[in-house]
Structures are given as C-alpha cells and as structure tokens.
Image: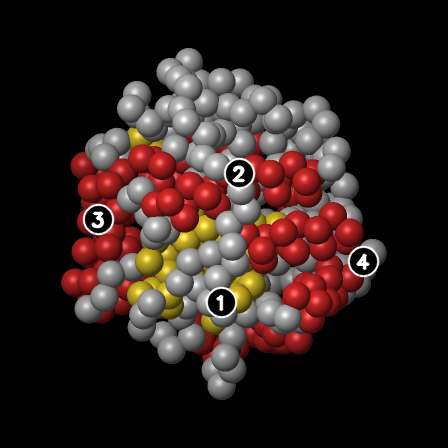
Amino acid sequence: MVRRESWPSALLLALATALLLGACRAPTATTPQPQESEVTTAPSPTASPSPTPTTEPVPAPDAPLLIGAYWYPWFGPGRQHWQEGYIGEPVLGEYDSADLDVIRQQITWASDHDIDLFVASWWGQGSKEDVILSTKLPGAIESTDFQFAILYETPGLLGMEDGHIDLGTDEAQQQLLDDVAYLARTYFSHPNYLRIDGRPVLVFYLTRAFWGDVQATIDAVRATVAEEIGVPAFVIADEVYWHIAVRQRIRPFDGITAYNMHTSVAGIADDFAAKVARKYTSWAAAAEAEGIAFVPNVLPGFDDTGVRPEANHPPIPRSEEGFRRQLTDAIDLAHGPARLVMITSWNEWHEFTSIEPGVSFGTSFLEVVRRVRQETGY
C-alpha cells in the first residue's frame, strides 16, 4: 500500500520497514511476536518462545462465503496518485476515482465475477477518499446488493514512529474515537454496508504495530459505535504475518486478517501459495481457539518497483495458478460468523496487486475468482 504524498519521510520509512521487512517491534513486552523459521526476518529483540498453535486444518463451517477486495478511491485528475509510479496498465486508463461511471464499471466487473464487496481505503474526515465514499459510492451501489466496508488507514491517521503505532497518547485516542464516531454516523447505517452478526465491520490496517492497551482501545471503538448507532462494531485487525500467532495478542479483536503476506526476503516468491497456506493454518487455529473470525487474504502478485525502485524489494510474479491455489486454500480456512476472504487488491496499481482488468491480463484474475467459487460450490 502506497502512502500519501503528504506523509513525512520518517513516517514513510518506518511504515515501509514495518510492512515490507516484517520488522514491527512487539506491541508490549508481554505479547512478543517471534519470527518463524520458514520465512526469516529480523527478530524482535524482546521476542521469546511462545507455544505454537496446532497446525491441523480448521474445518470449514457452513456460514455463507463472502469475497471482498481492497478498493482505493484515491486516483484523481491531473495524474493524482498515478504520478507516484505503477506497473501495468488499467483497461480504464489513468482514471479519476470520483468518476461515477468508473465506479459503476468497477462494481459491475466485481459483481459479474462473484466478488461481493469492496473494503475501501479511508484516509480521514474530509479527505478525497471520504468525499468519494460519502457522495459517489451510494449512487453507484443503489439498487444493488453489492456491499462495502471501511479500511481504516491507521499509520497515516494515528501516526507511526520507529515501526509502532502508540495507542497510549491522548492525541491518538481522541483522533481514533472521533474518526470512528464519524464513520458510524456517515457510513455504518447504509443498507449496503457490510455487517456481521448485525454489527458493522471495520477493518484496521497494520494493527500488529499497535503499542499500548489494545484491549481498552478496541473496547472504546466498539462502545463509540454503539453509542452512535445502537450496536458495536465488528473489528477485524491486520495482525496476521510471518511471526507466531500469540493468542493473547489477538484476543481483543472480533476477527484477524493479513493485508499482504509479501515480505522482503529472498525466495519469498518460491512456492508462495504453499508457504502462505502453512502459515495461515496456524493463525486460523489460534483464531478458532479464541472464538474469533479468521479472514485470510490472497493476492495475484506483488511488484513495487514502479513506485519505490530504490527499495529493491523482491517481487512475487503475477500468477493465475498461484492466485487460484491461494484462493482455494483461503476458502477452506476462512471461518467465523461470516466466512470472509479478502483480496489485495482491486486497484492498488502502485504495488501491482490489482485484479481489476488490465491491458496485459484482461479479466483473467477475475475469471479465477468466478471459477473457484463454482468449483468449490461457494
């Protein structure tokens, strides 16, 4: 995920390190996140051994399956955001995300290929993304059953320093709860907003970098939403990565997910789908033991050389077969009151994780989604 142009360079470096190098420090000394040997990254200096959850597959329940994709309404006229660099070429060209015809076409493509919802990147009250979501999206999904939810861009909104997001400051707490109250008033009562067990879903990006009292913070988020609309939020956290799943760490959330399992380690692309499946199995078991949802994520590939070539991050070549394997495994492992699988991404062209139609690959990745759903009966 690419940061906005206005981010300071120190924040950009910290987030890139945390997300792509897997070097987030443990949120507290009591919740270490040691690294696993299969994909070796720099261990936290405070890491200590933790019990490894069972790696037996988690049985797939009979809950309905939903497949969503992360959607970025951040492109604008004058090459806004496009100028940061990207790989590939959208069929729609360098479009404006505020164009209602573009949004309608994206939703039509998604719906026609059995994608149920977009989880929209949200960058704050009054941001370009907020304006598009509040004024354009409702008209595009009117009279459809296509759903949406919010991805709260935590590092950009709350700040990030030295690879962690400090929840203990008054400023961060006030910002978070003000934002959540606004989201509840603006979006959560929309008839097409995604709900699980009657509760609006709110996805938080990069929660594995949280420091402070995570339980109290998430409780306050739920309470704030309940005060606004009468029911608490269903909070899904971006906790899943290559470190060992620690049950105490994931306990505050209603569900856990991964935004992107790429990491800057040589050989990450070798049999990527199998590596991810093995890691997801242990996270799914930990989630089941805590009684929370496991929301696996899949991606068609990864290549950020168009936006940050100097980083020299190893790419994961795009592969329809690899994408199919990931999606099939994810459907098997997803569990919770709603079986949700997320795709990174619909249109994050900067990191070339996009599955919306491209000139070089057409609708091939969308066709994979439709075929897998037909083959699995979901």
Quick check: 371 left or right of 168? right
Label 3 belongs to which residue? 219
Q: Residues within 10 Å of mark 1 (few under 14, many from 20)?
A: few
Label 1 belongs to which residue? 62
* Cα distance in 3D space between marks 3 and 1: 29 Å
Furthest residue to the left? Answer: 227
Amino acid type shown at disc 2: Thr
Vertical arrangement, residue 355 with respect to residue 173, above or below: below
Q: Secondary structure at mark 1?
A: loop
Q: Residue at coordinates 56% horizontally, 37% vertically from top-left?
A: 279
Q: Residue at coordinates 78% horizontally, 62% vertically from top-left?
A: 364
Q: How is the image coloured?
A: secondary structure
Label 2 belongs to which residue? 55
* Cα distance in 3D space between marks 4 and 1: 34 Å
Query: Which badge, 2 or 3, comes first in the chain's sequence?
Result: 2
Q: Secondary structure at mark 3?
A: helix
Q: Secondary structure at mark 4?
A: loop
- Residue 182 drawn at (x, y percent): 27, 60
Q: Nearer the viewer, mark 4 or mark 3?
A: 3
Query: Which badge, 4 or 1, comes first in the chain's sequence?
Result: 1
* Cα distance in 3D space between marks 4 and 3: 44 Å
Q: Residues within 10 Å of mark 2 (few under 14, many from 20)?
A: some
Q: Residue at coordinates 53% horizontally, 28% vertically from top-left?
A: 22
Label 4 belongs to which residue? 361
